[in-house]
Image (cartoon, rainbow, N blue to C red):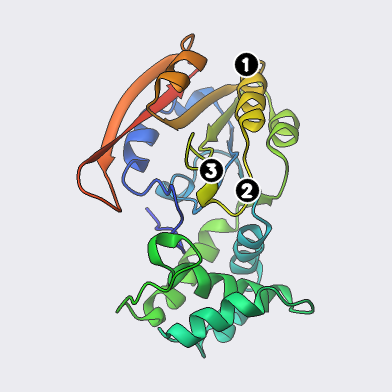
């Protein structure tokens, strides 16, 4: 089991084991596709899910980071090496990401700093964290080795699903939850929620879908298998209720 290289809003660190327990038997699928890859917590839970593994995300900065970890890990580590937990460096990284002319590795390093040092992975506020960056930077080599067998995509959700759909495909979808879309830098609208539903309605393969537990989601996916789960809330006291939805 490998951990995500960065924190992300909506990350599945606390639910990944439960989600994987609900996967179909391995003999039923030979390709595994994460439509909303995010921090990759579910992907990284196992050393390998299937012969073909695909990671996809709409956030180009995140996709660039994953590709740099996979293909240019040592160079990325060197670029990160000069950074430490500092409010000034955090806001410098944010400003530099707005610049043109950075290499992919330079952009990946600054995005990494932005996410590692931001409060609640919001990418905007400095977290004042005491955790050193050294250990997390060294851990990137472990992530790089895990990603060597993974195809990293940057596609629209409908295009991606249609491209990889087969009877032996397993899609894991973890879209922005209803009401939380504003916390993501990449827009996701009600039309996108509906478009995801329409696309999943017609897949030849299998899907497993994470969502927040709301009457709207339950109504939208009432024809599928719905499992209720809960986890501790990262930013406040109490439990947060979620749904795991499957077409198998």
- Mark 3 lies on a secondary structure that is helix
Instruction: Give left or right: position of 220 versus 18.
Output: right
Residue 148 placed where, x, y %? Answer: 60, 58
Residue 123, above or below 197: below
Residue 44 image position (x, y, % from top left):
45, 51
Circle 1 Cα neighbour tier, 10 Å, few/some/many (<14 / 14–19 / ≥20)? some
Q: CA distance from mark 1 to mark 3?
A: 22 Å
Q: Residue at x 42, y 46 (%)?
A: 46
Instruction: Mark 3 vs mark 2: give the one in front.
Output: 3
Q: CA distance from mark 2 to mark 1?
A: 21 Å
Q: At x 52% / y 71%, what residue is drawn?
A: 114
Checking the image for residue 245, the label placed there is none
Seen at 71% across and 49% down, the residue is: 154
Q: Residues within 10 Å of mark 3 (few under 14, many from 20)?
A: some
93 versus 70 height, above or below: below
Q: Where residue 54 sits: x, y (%)?
A: 62, 44
Q: Residue furthest right?
A: 101
Secondary element type, mark 2 = loop
User: Which of the numbered marks, if any, corresponds to residue 57?
Assistant: 2
Furthest-left residue in view?
238
Residue 79 horizontal side relative to residue 216, left or right: right
**Distance between mark 3 and mark 2 Cα atoms:** 15 Å
Label 1: element kind: helix
Query: Circle 3 is placed at which residue position?
Result: 181
Q: Earlier in the sequence, mark 2 or mark 1?
A: 2
The residue closer to the viewer here, 240 or 136, is: 240
Query: Who comes first in sequence, dot 1 or dot 3?
Result: 3
- In front of the other: 92 or 211: 92
**Residue 201, disc:** 1
Q: Is residue 73 visible?
A: no
């Amino acid at each position: 089991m490998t951990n995500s290289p960065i924190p992300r809003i909506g990350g599945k660190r606390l639910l990944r084991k439960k989600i994987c327990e609900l996967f179909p038997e391995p003999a039923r699928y030979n390709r595994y596709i994460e439509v909303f890859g995010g921090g990759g917590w579910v992907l990284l839970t196992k050393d390998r899910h299937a012969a073909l593994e695909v990671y996809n995300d709409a956030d180009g900065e995140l996709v660039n980071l994953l590709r740099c970890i996979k293909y240019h890990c040592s160079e990325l580590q060197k670029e990160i090496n000069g950074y430490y937990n500092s409010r000034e460096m955090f806001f410098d990284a944010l400003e530099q990401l707005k610049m043109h002319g950075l290499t992919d590795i330079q952009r990946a390093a600054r995005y990494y700093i932005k996410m590692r040092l931001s409060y609640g992975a919001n990418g905007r506020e400095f977290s004042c964290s005491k955790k050193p960056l050294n250990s997390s930077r060294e851990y990137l080599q472990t992530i790089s080795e895990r990603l060597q067998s993974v195809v990293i995509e940057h596609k629209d959700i409908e295009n991606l699903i249609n491209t990889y759909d087969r009877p032996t495909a397993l899609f894991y979808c973890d879209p922005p939850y209803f009401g939380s879309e504003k916390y993501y830098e990449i827009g996701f609208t009600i039309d996108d929620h509906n478009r995801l539903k329409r696309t999943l309605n017609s897949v030849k393969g299998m899907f497993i879908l994470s969502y927040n537990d709301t009457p709207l989601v339950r109504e939208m996916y009432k024809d599928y298998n719905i499992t209720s789960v809960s986890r501790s809330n990262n930013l406040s006291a109490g439990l947060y209720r979620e749904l795991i939805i499957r077409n198998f």
